[in-house]
Image (spheres, rainbow, N blue to C red):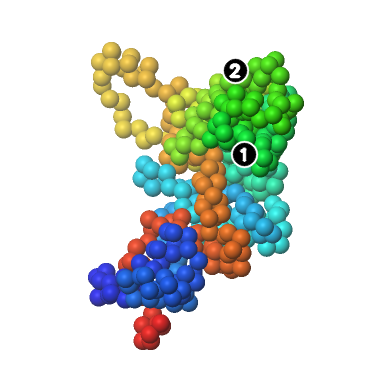
Amino acid sequence: MEAHGFVDQRTMEIFKWMEWVIARNHPLAEVDDPLTRGLASVKPVSSKTLLRYMRHVSAKVVEHISESMGEAFGLMFDGWSCGTLHFVGIYAVFAQGECLRKVLLALSPAEYRQSADAHIDMIHAVLELYGKDSSMLVFLVTDNCPINQATATRLAFPLIGSASHRFNVAVSRYLVDYQSLVDQVQALSIQLRFPNNAAELVRDTRLKLLKANATRWASTFKMLARYVTIRDAIKMVSAVEDLLPRPITHRQIVQLVSKLEDLDSVRVKLQAEDRSLTDARLLFDAVMARYPMTVEHLKPSAKIVHSPAFESAVVKLLPDQPLARAEEEAVTRFVISATIKNKGPERVDFATATLRQAKRPRHASSTKYMDLLRMIPPTTNRCERLFSQCRLILTPLRSSLLPANFEKIVFLHANRELWDFISLLGCEDADEQRVE
């Protein structure tokens, strides 16, 4: 029956429990709770049995991913800290037909240190789990921090620095000249968060003044924009009258908000899943033209860029522009056909020959590259979204959750489309013969 994909009732019940726990970010022990069992319409299952099935399904998902990855792929990774724990999320990036796939391979804790050598050891361990080795790796996508750049250098692979991270660094430096304006609104925001002042403010508006986050410039923009929106209501709070920016300062803040609106639109566009390196370059060029102070970080040859020739080559290949020699050398590992077979001259009329010559790529593309090269993502936003999901799972009330079990829950959640009730077949249910 298993060979034909038939699933018995008990397996389907366990599948429903597993799907519920993983999709709704519940703790494993939720299935042991008497109230939960009383409300459920399916036969109960113990948390130990559920965990055993999760291990079984995870192994099948690993096999499926290993087959799909092929022998040429990239890795996207980023780090996330929660309390005293630091995790590294690693995605496989590969082409499947004409589609780009980004699949979570692991969310491993960095148990000892955060260094380039530790990252390399972790990458090798994850690849070994999937039956792969570093010779199949063709590029890395991650933030532009020194540790990640050192990792790429020692592995001898090109690194695509996250465009979102690079843009955030550029805008943060741009805001340094406006720090005095930001500090005034931040001080005002802190005072308006006190209970008495907040109670007085709510009489005139339901909106609250936001507080800027030191690590995210977008929060600064939101704080300033909110201040501009509710300034008239803030005037009614007598306790903060001395902190309210004067008219000339207010006009400067309004002008700054207008500029940040432009920059924030770029930030949002960079987060789209279908964004390409060429799109990122077009956006960066437009920002540099309007805000010259960002050139230092956004230009193609910026010091923050680890592999400028490689990034430039990918940007040019999408619109089929000619490559410089250094750029051709940077993408050599992606070549799949150095020459086009000569099938003999085709007799055509003069006009057809003229049009074909005009449409022929200027770099005479006798060189063919992997489809994956043109699909390389410019950001690690998929990792950021994963970490946002992780915060819903590893809450302070669940800090005792074992890292291995946490990784299994996140792995199955991120790869939900790769498993179904048939994936549970082959795992014995120890609870089946007893009442739970």
Residue depicted at 39% across the width and 63% down the height: 19
Residue 20 visible in image: yes
- Residue with the most extreme top position: 351
User: Dot 2: what SS?
Assistant: helix
Query: How many residues crowd mark 2 within 10 Å: few (<14), some (14–19), many (20+)?
Result: few
The N terminus, quarter of image: bottom left
Decide if residue 130 is on the left or right side of residue 14: right
Residue 127 visible in image: no
Amino acid type, callout 1 = Ala
The C terminus, quarter of image: bottom left
Query: How many residues crowd mark 1 within 10 Å: few (<14), some (14–19), many (20+)?
Result: few
Amino acid type, callout 2 = Arg
Which residue matches tag 2?
290
Residue depicted at 25% across the width and 71% down the height: 6
Along the line of sight, the residue nearer the viewer: 225 or 12: 225
Which residue matches tag 1?
199
Where does residue 400 sit, x and y in percent of width and height?
61, 68
Where does residue 75 sit, x and y in percent of width and height?
54, 49
Where does residue 190 sit, x and y in percent of width and height?
70, 37
- Looking at the picture, does residue 319 appear above or below residue 248? below
Give the Cα separation between the discs numbered 1 and 2.
42 Å
- Looking at the picture, does residue 317 appear above or below residue 401? above
Pointer 1 or 2: first along the chain = 1
Where does residue 40 sit, x and y in percent of width and height?
35, 70
Which of labels 1 and 2 is toward the front? 1
Along the line of sight, the residue nearer the viewer: 62 or 331: 62
